[in-house]
Image: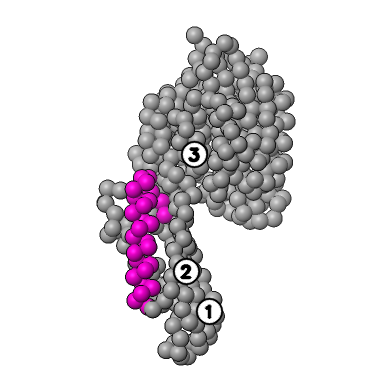
Amino acid sequence: MIIDLDDLEREMTHWRRDLHTHPEFGFEETRTAAFVASKLREFGLDEIVEGVGGTGVVGTLRRGGGNRSIALRADMDALRIPERGTHEHRSLTPGVMHACGHDGHTSMLLGAAKLLAAEGGFDGTVRFIFQPAEEWGRGALAMLDDGLLQRFPFQEIYGLHNAPGVPVGQLRSRPGPIMSAEDNFEIVLKGVGGHAARPNGGNETLVAACALVTSLQTIVSRRLSPTDVAVVSVTELLTDGTRNALPGEARILGDARSFKQKVSADIERQMRVISEGVALAYNLQHTVTYTREFVPLLNDPLLTQAVLGAAAEVLGEGNVSLMSEPFTASEDFARFLDHVPGCFAFIGNGDSAPLHNPDYDFDDAGLTHGARTHAAIVRSRLSIP
């Protein structure tokens, strides 16, 4: 049976807007997962398993006699961001919205499942992975820890993410590093707070914290090789002071991005050295907590070329291109690539608000492009003999 693409686009738009209206935070995607599983059953997939890694869903579709298996992955979770948009399908959940387009990613993959189930055109097995909790870097690990690779084996994996600023209908990717690792840090300075009129009566922490924030910026500019891409960002400075009271404790929080394990280790080492030095200079106690939340996302070179070729078949040669530089945001799709080769690519979302912005919305005009690209990858990698 041949699917009418106009009908499919209308259907995917309806799904996407329904999911946008009912966003769910990571590991809370019970309604979303049930919606996904219901659609996969409707399409006639061979197997649908719910509750993988908490709220994940895996659908399996087999055609022909081929023994190769590949996976397509979409993320389902929303963010704790209050939506500012006024469209009819805006979030009905206070303080939670799909500000990263995971509603679109889920709908695109559902559309691909419907296309492939109805039309076939491949020889082998496709795993449709609907993942929870991407935003805080725990969903992929949860599915892997729940035996994803043993229960639903596959040899390759592919994913798409929307990209604001890239025209709808265009796709971009690159071999090797494409998205960075994300490390989180918290530095706590402790001293003795006191009256704002008598700073000499205590040993306050705010001036030291400000000096430390400034000094942390030298890690990238002075301690790392200029050829290594890295970002160190302080995102919060919290104290227990008030208008007329100097703080006795200051907390500095932020994150660091890099593409190499050695660079991540160097950032942590320098951060500890600088923190110890500032604490000593200001006669304060200090602690540093440094965690690695996301690993670098490294595309397989050969499979990246395969994705670009498959996308060109459906989007046109002029709408597919190589990215000149990696993107310093992070994605836990990288965890799957620790186990099997694959490729992650960006598909255009047009002139939308940025990701993680309260005015963001997925552009429904991109849904068919994403679904067809997913299907083209499957038909390319599981070609009929």
Residue wearing tag 2: 188
Q: Nearer the viewer, residue 278 or 220?
A: 278
- Which residue is located at x 52 percent, y 84 percent? 245
Q: Are marks 3 and 1 in contact (CB under 8 Å)?
A: no
- Residue 108 visible in the current orientation: no
Residue wearing tag 3: 335
* Span colored in magenta: 256-282
Classify 10 Å Cα crowding around label 2: few (below 14), some (14-19), many (20 and above).
Answer: many
Foreground: disc 1 or disc 2: 2
Q: Amino acid at mark 3?
A: Arg
Q: How is the image coloured?
A: one colour
For the residues marked 1 and 2, what is the alpha-carbon distance in whole angstroms? 14 Å
For the residues marked 2 and 3, what is the alpha-carbon distance in whole angstroms? 30 Å
Classify 10 Å Cα crowding around label 1: few (below 14), some (14-19), many (20 and above).
Answer: some
User: Which quadrant of the structure image shows residue 217?
Assistant: bottom left
Residue wearing tag 1: 241
Q: Is residue 71 left or right of residue 337?
A: right
Q: Are marks 1 and 2 in contact (CB under 8 Å)?
A: no
Up-down: is 362 above or below 3? below
The answer to which of marks 3 and 1 sits earlier in the sequence is 1
Q: Amino acid at mark 1?
A: Gly
Please provide percent x and percent y for residue 281: 34, 76
Q: Main secondary structure of the magenta part?
A: helix
Count of picture labels: 3
Up-down: is 83 above or below 324? below
